[in-house]
Amino acid sequence: MKRLLSIIIAIMMFLISAITNATGDVTRDGKIDSRDIALIQKHIIYSVSLDNIQMKAADYNGDGCINSRDIARMQLKLLDLVSEPESSPTEPSTFSIHFIDVGQADAALVECDGHYMLIDGGNCGDSSLIFSVLKNEKVPVLDILIASHAHEDHVGGLSGALNYTTAKLTLCPVKSYDSDVFNDFSKYADKNGGGITVPKAGAEYMLGSAKLTILGLNLADDTNNTSIVLKITYGNTSFLFTGDAEREAEQALLDNGVDLSATVLKVGHHGADTSTTYPFLREIMPEYAVISVGEGNSYDHPTEATLSKLEDANVKLYRTDMQGNIYCTSDGHKVSFTVEKNKDADVYSKITPTLKPTAAPTPETTSPASNARDYVLNNSTKKFHYPSCSSAAKIKEENKGYFEGTRQELIDRGYSPCGICKP
Ligand SMILES: [Zn+2]
Ligand SMILES: [Zn+2]
């Protein structure tokens, strides 16, 4: 029996070394760590047939002492050793992230096994876009809605989401913040999102078979540094979202020793210099990164420094300012990306700001959903308007709503058309 065990170990060593050699791409740094081992184990499951195992057993059995029962036992032992049920998403499992092009802002819709999570919703002007995206996706309900922090470019459009559907859980690092936009979001969260919950660092939530881990939040008085930093794990792939967290928050995460490693990094603070420090990036070691940023924005995001750090680290980069909406899928082993436009854009280059120096982001004109007919509602007067209507802009935030659908549907719901824009 002892000899049998040593034969099994020899076979395992042989297989692992052969497979490691054959899959040089598994290790990105030339060293094998636990992540690589997990990948190798998967390779063994998928690429080594039982016949091969039997053949290798015969190779190692110089004296002919192994009988068929031993081989059957070895097969069981090997299968037992290589199977790793926890990180093997079962079929038919799906996982995708849509990085929504909201200009100089953030919004991402995550789907796993028919469960949905929205991370940020862009600016107030993106409300109808967010509404359309959820509608096009036929999102039945948001399992989780996250406002990474209280700034308008993250919470502004969340009212559009909570106007379309409800959220079972709404996470935000603060429950109050001194701005009309936040108050509006907070009201919608109370009405349709179960109220704001401030999560604890280390908290875990499931989204289908994907796991959401809150890595940190509320690390300082500075609003950007309150950002919820989270990791989504799906099989052997993972996705790190850092909101607008800056270097102080990055350092605190490093000090806390949390596992930052991720396949995909949603680059912090729209690619600003204040984030993505070298030590932080080194811990993450992402293969891919996404920057959500407005074309020709007045903040000069993303900065040359951030772009060159990502390029130096061999990170494959995607940018919403150049490529519009960005779609990422994962099969639990590897991720793939598609973009709305400019697949081969020179993403590491600092493009010269265009001739809209301080203009507010105009996602409506860059989004594929922009042709959708949206109406703005005044829930107090029960009038509906075209979004471009001058009186729509004057509606108090607490009375304002958004609707996509036909005019008749609104009339059926008791609304009447505005006399100015005559929708
Ligand atoms: Zn921001
Ligand atoms: Zn911010």
Image: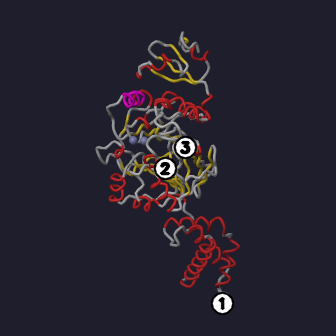
Mark 3 or 1: the one toward you: 3
Q: Residue furthest left?
A: 221
The residue under the point 60% across, 48% down is 94
Q: Which residue is mark 1?
A: 63
Question: In which quadrant will I find the C terminus?
Answer: top right
Question: In which quadrant will I find the N terminus?
Answer: bottom right
The residue under the point 51% across, 39% down is 103
Q: Residue furthest top?
A: 419
Ligand number 2: quarter of image: top left
> Within 8 Å of ligand 1, the CB of disc 1?
no
Disc nearer the start of the sequence (2/1): 1
Q: Which residue is mark 3?
A: 321
Would residue 361 be counted in the magenta stretch? no
At which x and y percent is residue 287?
A: 53, 59
Disc 2/disc 1 C-alpha distance (Å): 57 Å
The residue under the point 51% across, 71% down is 32
Give, as a single range, the part of the protein colored magenta.
Answer: 180-188
Q: Is residue 1 above or below residue 292?
A: below
Disc nearer the start of the sequence (3/1): 1
At which x and y percent is residue 230?
A: 43, 49
Q: Which residue is mark 2?
A: 266
Mark 3 or 2: the one toward you: 3
User: Is residue 111 visible in the rendered structure shown here?
Assistant: no
Q: Is residue 351 above or below residue 33?
A: above
The residue under the point 47% across, 48% down is 302
Q: Nearer the viewer, residue 215 or 321?
A: 321
The amino acid marked with disc number 1 is Asp
The secondary element bearing badge 2 is classed as: strand
